[in-house]
Image: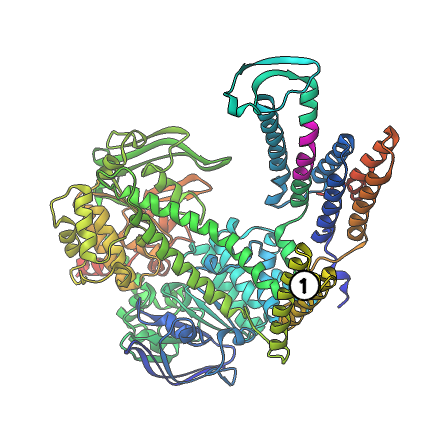
């Protein structure tokens, strides 16, 4: 059997998208140039709208846009009403009141200048850009596929997420069913149905369903383990590694005189945790169906992101440079083409 | 392949079955039959260790599967040799996509990705599921869900499949598909299959042997003919054959037809069965809908349906899964309002009534009777119902005593048998004497005796002046009790008429007796008995 049959079409490894998004986030937080931020936002939107997945998460870019716009508007309103006065061209004058002496630092209302609006928009642009990047990354990947690429030891967490996403709608349906059944029973007097009448049948139903699910998963071999000697070792390593990370963070934040190499402690602890995770994963007999491979496209994505960050950080901000940054931000969409 | 030696199972001291000795050979198709609550499911689950590992209880004796003792094995360790499919396949699904569901067992077993891919493709082809591979589980029909569940078990290449009531939720056509599939697995792949099933009329013709769980702790295994000769639960075909002392006992319609010449001859002169006369009398009409359209979003669930339901009549609504039966019931109880067309209950529009006054006009028994019940005992349930509806204290429990006199009023509703729970829900709903009574799939999980009793109860209620409507797949029950049948397909009314006319016209819906005695129009064993008595 050749592994050619395993080609998974145009699916891009989810970590590649998140790597790209992380680089974009870095670029956005490092820059203070509004035009660069605008270029990154446009790039994230173009890529998301062209390459997003076909799952329910594809909508997340829409919500991110709503959220970003709402955040900007809220900031604008609050700053216009309460913010400090900035001299310049007055656009409109809001009615103002004089606050008592002890609140003299805060002004309410007064003239709103175009300079002030620009300043607020510029300040808000960074946050809005970050929200859009996050929304784009979620719309480009499916959480389930991200879970698939987790280390094997974390597989159970992934299964829990997947099971609950299929189980919750069933519970919701069950609540609806019981409510209608009870309503048709015609409870007299009480307008709202008493809680127990709905809750008890729903809980009974949920318990029956979860027992069924447990039986199904059990008889399908879920949780089969291979007894290997490394089991205790991996547990000890995980514990030591996690404690080391805590200690490293502590040392980093509160420098002490006798250990002055916190980064080394952190790195060593992280390495031990990773090995521990890998070892404990080896005890499980798990494999992944149709794993997503790192292909050329996937490797290129984070690289594109990193070059964007580098460009945004170093290039002089001329018009040509901005067009270059914009092109770089949109590059994944141009490179991958429109996804179905 | 599976052998039980002196196996006994107890729950808290009560024996479910004791000293069971039986061998199931490789490649056999075995049926587990017995009354509701007799321990069929427990016996089935003993075979892959779910009982006692998951359910508790005390198991003694030896169980060998594939020449291994399973005493120290957990069900998950048996996953490579046994596939198990529970009663509600949807509740057992782990993934949301068909393809991932098929791969789940293999992922747990740690098969390599290319083996997994190959097996998934093979299984998709074997079960004809390729068109569904990318579909979400929630959008599958009940028959498709059952086939995906079977596929998900098959990808692990087990030698044995255990299925708990695989056809109980399916319409006759989908049930035939699933059974034909099982039949093919036995014949082509050499699979050993054990199924527990109530609807014997659907399965006895396919199986090699029958395990009879008697309910008193005694379990026997024999060939189908011997088992059915003795059993008190038999499909109509066998009942007729036993009455006529046909030998050997026919298990298929074809065999029975060959033996039925004499009977057909005798019945030629008999007057055709008389049906209840008032099914279509306009004076008795209580509920009517006129060209109603009902939709969920863009999906049209009902299109231009016009119907009337009369007092004193039992009507059956039939059709494929998803044909609009449940929507029709939901519309009559006011849960959905029609986009177009008119619907009235005794002259009132359900959408304009308060839920309390609506509940005086129409009663609804849901598919899960447990949805209605919330009290800690039967008597508390009845008392709460009297209070809710402003009835004289004792009304509900009096009705319950008429429906099922032997019910224990101190039991928790969950501890009742399926049939008793249904009777309780029915009593709770019918106590307010709503003229229209609707039942959604009332026979799921009921054995023949419980079904016969349900038939009697419904007839009593109809004679008391209720208009009764049941949505069901159960052809034999419909033949037995319904006066009139409505068939829906794709949300449209395709047939509406007296039971005989509708059922005898369709090969999928024809009851067994009618298939044997065609072209005469006898549908049930009672029709035959009545005809012979009137002749004599």
SS assignment at label 1: helix
Residue A266 on the magenta segment: no
Q: Please tell me which residue is depicted at 54% across the width and 15% down the height of the picture.
A: A96
The residue to which callout 1 is attached is B117
Q: Quadrant of residue A116?
A: top right
Up/down of B458 relative to B448, above or below: above
Q: What span is in magenta? A: A121-132
How far across and down, in percent of the image, does residue A85 sit? 64, 20
Q: Is residue A309 above or below residue B218?
A: above
- Density class for disc 1 (Cα within 10 Å; few <14, some 14-19, many ≥20) is many
* Position of the N terminus of chain A by quadrant: bottom right
Q: Residue at x 62, y 51 (%)?
A: A143
Relative height, residue B481 to residue A216 (above, below): above
Q: Quadrant of residue B5?
A: bottom left
Residue A130 part of the magenta segment: yes
* Secondary structure mostly taken by the magenta-highlighted segment of the chain: helix
Q: Is residue A292 left or right of residue B146?
A: right
């Amino acid at each position: 059997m050749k592994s050619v049959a395993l080609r998974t079409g145009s699916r891009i490894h989810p970590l590649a998208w998140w790597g790209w998004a992380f680089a974009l986030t870095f670029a956005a937080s490092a820059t203070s140039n509004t035009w660069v931020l605008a270029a990154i936002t446009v790039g994230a939107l173009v890529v998301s709208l062209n390459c997003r997945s076909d799952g329910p998460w594809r909508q997340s870019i829409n919500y991110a846009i709503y959220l970003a716009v709402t955040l900007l508007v809220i900031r604008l309103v609050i700053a216009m009403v309460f913010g400090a006065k900035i001299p310049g061209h007055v656009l409109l004058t809001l009615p103002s009141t004089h606050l008592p002496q002890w609140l003299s630092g805060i002004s309410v209302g007064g003239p709103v200048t175009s300079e002030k609006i620009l300043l607020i928009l510029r300040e808000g642009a960074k946050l809005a850009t970050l929200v859009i990047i996050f929304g784009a990354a979620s719309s480009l990947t499916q959480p389930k596929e991200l879970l698939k690429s987790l280390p094997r030891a974390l597989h159970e967490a992934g299964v829990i997420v997947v099971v609950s996403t299929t189980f919750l709608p069933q519970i919701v349906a069950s609540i609806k069913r019981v409510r209608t059944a009870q309503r048709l029973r015609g409870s007299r007097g009480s307008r709202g149905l008493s809680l127990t009448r709905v809750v008890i049948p729903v809980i009974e139903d949920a318990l029956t369903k979860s027992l069924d699910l447990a039986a199904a998963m059990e008889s399908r071999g879920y949780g089969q383990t291979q007894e290997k000697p490394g089991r205790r070792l991996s547990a000890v390593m995980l514990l030591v590694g996690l404690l080391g990370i805590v200690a490293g963070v502590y040392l980093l934040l509160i420098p002490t005189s006798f250990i002055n190499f916190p980064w080394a402690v952190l790195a060593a602890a992280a390495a031990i945790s990773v090995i521990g995770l890998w070892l404990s994963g080896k005890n499980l007999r798990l494999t992944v169906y149709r794993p997503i491979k790192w292909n050329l496209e996937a490797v290129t994505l984070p690289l594109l992101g990193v070059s964007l960050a580098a460009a945004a950080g170093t290039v002089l901000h001329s018009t040509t440079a901005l067009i270059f940054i914009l092109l770089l931000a949109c590059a994944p969409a141009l490179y991958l083409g429109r996804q179905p | 392949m599976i052998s039980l030696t002196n196996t006994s199972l107890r729950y808290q001291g009560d024996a479910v079955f004791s000293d069971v000795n039986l061998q199931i050979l490789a490649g056999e198709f075995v049926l587990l039959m017995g009354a509701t609550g007799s321990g069929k499911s427990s016996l089935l689950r003993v075979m892959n260790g779910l009982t006692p590992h998951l359910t508790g209880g005390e198991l003694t004796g030896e169980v060998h599967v594939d020449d291994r003792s399973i005493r120290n094995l957990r069900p998950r360790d048996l996953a490579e040799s046994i596939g198990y499919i529970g009663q509600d396949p949807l509740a057992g699904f782990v993934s949301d996509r068909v393809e991932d569901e098929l791969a789940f067992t293999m992922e747990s077993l740690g098969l390599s990705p290319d083996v997994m891919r190959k097996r998934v493709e093979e299984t998709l082809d074997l079960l004809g599921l390729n068109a569904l591979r990318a579909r979400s589980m929630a959008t599958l029909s009940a028959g498709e869900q059952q086939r995906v569940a079977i596929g998900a078990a098959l990808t692990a290449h087990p030698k044995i499949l255990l299925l708990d009531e695989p056809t109980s939720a399916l319409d006759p056509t989908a049930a035939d598909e699933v059974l034909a599939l099982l039949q093919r697995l036995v014949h082509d792949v050499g699979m050993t299959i054990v199924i527990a099933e109530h609807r014997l009329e659907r399965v006895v013709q396919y199986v090699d042997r029958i395990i009879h769980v008697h309910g008193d702790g005694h379990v026997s295994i024999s060939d189908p003919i011997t088992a059915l000769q003795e059993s008190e639960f038999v499909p109509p075909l066998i009942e007729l054959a036993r009455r006529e002392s046909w030998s050997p006992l026919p298990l298929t319609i074809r065999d029975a037809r060959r033996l039925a010449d004499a009977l057909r001859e005798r019945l030629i002169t008999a007057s055709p069965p008389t049906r209840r006369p008032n099914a279509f009398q306009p004076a008795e009409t209580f509920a009517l809908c006129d060209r109603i359209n009902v939709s969920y979003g863009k999906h049209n669930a009902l299109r231009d349906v016009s119907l009337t339901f009369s007092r004193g009549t039992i009507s059956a609504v039939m059709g494929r899964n998803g044909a609009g039966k449940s929507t029709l019931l939901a519309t009559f109880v006011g849960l959905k309002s029609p986009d177009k067309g008119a619907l009235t209950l005794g002259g009132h529009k359900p959408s304009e009534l308060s839920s309390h006054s609506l509940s005086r006009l129409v009663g609804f028994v849901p598919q899960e009777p447990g949805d209605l019940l919330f009290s800690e005992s039967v008597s508390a349930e009845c008392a709460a119902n009297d209070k809710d509806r402003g009835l004289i204290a004792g009304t509900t429990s009096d009705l319950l005593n008429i429906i099922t006199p032997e019910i224990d009023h101190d039991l928790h509703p969950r501890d009742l048998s399926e049939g008793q729970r249904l009777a309780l829900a029915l009593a709770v709903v019918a106590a307010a004497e709503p003229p229209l009574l609707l039942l959604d799939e009332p026979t799921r999980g009921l054995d023949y005796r419980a079904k016969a009793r349900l038939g009697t109860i419904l007839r009593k209620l109809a004679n008391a002046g209720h208009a009764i409507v049941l949505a069901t797949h159960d052809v034999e029950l419909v033949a037995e009790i319904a006066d009139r049948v409505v068939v829906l397909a794709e949300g449209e009314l395709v047939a509406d008429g007296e039971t005989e006319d509708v059922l005898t016209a369709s090969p999928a819906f024809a009851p067994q007796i009618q298939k044997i005695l065609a072209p005469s129009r006898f549908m049930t064993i009672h029709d035959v008995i009545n005809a012979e008595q009137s002749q004599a």
